[in-house]
Structures are given as structure tokens and as C-alpha cells.
Image: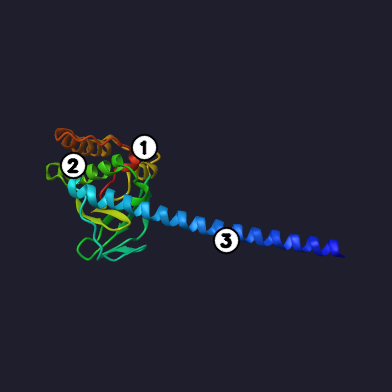
Amino acid sequence: MDSFKIQAQDAIQKAQHLELEQDQFFDDVQEMKAQFDKLAESHRKLMWEYLPARDPSLRAIPRMSTQLLETPTAVGKYPLEQAMGYGQYAVVYSSSTPEHPRLAIKAIDKLKLVDLVSLHRISSEITSLSDPAIKHPGILDLLEVIHTRKHIYLVTERGGKDLFEFFGSHLEGLAENMIRPLLLHLAQAVEVLHRHNYCHRDLKPYSRLLRA
């Protein structure tokens, strides 16, 4: 009987010791999370507030708005309607306002952009789309850039179906008199880009839109 009590007491002590170790483990995890969150916040401020305000090559990135309402279904006055496409670090939504019934909004997730190369890529994209020299009927207009705590939003015109969809509904083929103006319009838009030293780098049926 005494042996049983000793074993029971030993088991209780071991259980208490394990419980203390578990509590310490959870405390350590919470401390590590707090340190990580602090580091992540410092990194966010460096990437999205300090550098764009001081590096001329990043001036296209606007100041972050802390007053603008941002929810999963809207940002400011723009509703985020149907998801139209997904990229490595962004989602493109359809949107509309009374002034602009056909809009597309590219929501760029800042958490997925963790280095200076990504930051310069976003700044370059905004600079290119904002350049009045490349204004052309075949190039979608950038209407607004919105910078929130979580995202960079690029608000543009919205085209119609892409060329891949268009080809898919004409499985019997397309007449030359239909294809010729499409290719001409595309070539003219690309020529405008090249004339001003821009390279598209992603010309494909999925990314060519027909105006509705």
C-alpha cells in the first residue's frame, strides 16, 4: 500500500511538473509571438511608410490612409464585388460606382510583399499605369491608387471578356476580317508602350480584354 502511495505521489509530481513546463512553453510562445509582431510592425513601417517617403524611386506609392473604411467587401466608396482573377500577391475584383459602372480593382496584399524588389515592382507598376504618355484606347486607365494598412488598391477601367473566352465561343474559327482589327488594335497599344520604353512582358489571351 505504501508503495502504491509513493508511486501515486510520484505520478502527481510528474504531472505537476509537466503542467508547469506546458505553461512555460505557452508563455514562451506568446513572448515569441509578441516579438514577431513587433518586428513585423517595424518591417511594415519601414517598407510602406519610411522608404516611400524618402526614396524618390518609390514616390508613386501614396501615403497610407488610416481614415478610409476597409472591409472584405469594400474599400472606401468602392464595393469589392466578384473576384475576377487571382495572382501571386493580388486579387482582382469587379466593382462599380454611379460615376463608373464598370471598374476593376486590383487588391495587392502587402503581407505578401516582403522585400525591396517587390516594393519597387509595385511602384513601377503604378508609375507606368499613371503615365499620361501611354494613354491609349487599348490600355486601361488607372483611375485611383488607394493605400490602406493591409492593401494597395489599383482602381482601373474594366474591360469585357478576355480573348481566351472569346476564342472559346468561336471553336469553328474566326474570319480574317474579324481577327485583323483585333491584332491591329493590340499591336498599336504595344507600339505605344514600346515607344515610351515600357515592356508588357505578359502578352497572352488571358490578359487581353475586349471592351464590352
Quick one: 47 or 23, which is closer to the camera? 23
- Dots 1, 3 in contact, CB < 8 A: no
Return the disc, 1 or 3, that comes first in the chain's sequence: 3
Residue type, numbered disc 2: Ser
Q: Secondary structure at mark 1?
A: loop
Residue appearing at x 27%, y 37% in the figure: 179
Q: SS at mark 3?
A: helix
Locate residue 208, reporting x and y percent.
29, 42
Q: Would residue 77 be found to the left or right of residue 73 on screen?
A: left
Q: CA distance from mark 1 to mark 3?
A: 69 Å
Residue 78, horizontal then vertical, whole percent:
27, 63
Q: Which residue is mark 2?
A: 57
Foreground label between 3 and 2 = 3
| Colouring method of the image | rainbow
Q: Quadrant of residue 63?
A: bottom left
| Residue 108 at least partly seen | no
Above or below for 18 versus 127: below
Judge by depth and name the residue closer to the eye, 48 or 155: 48
Q: Which residue is mark 1?
A: 173
For this rendering, which residue is in front, 188 or 157? Answer: 157
Residue 105 percent coordinates (x, y): 29, 55
Marks 2 and 1, how far apart in space? 46 Å
**Amino acid type shown at disc 1:** Gly
143 to 183, vertically: above or below: below
- Tell me the residue at 18%/42% (across/down): 57
Name the residue tied to disc 3: 23
| Residue 31 visible in the snapshot | yes
Sequence-wise, the earlier of marks 3 and 2 is 3
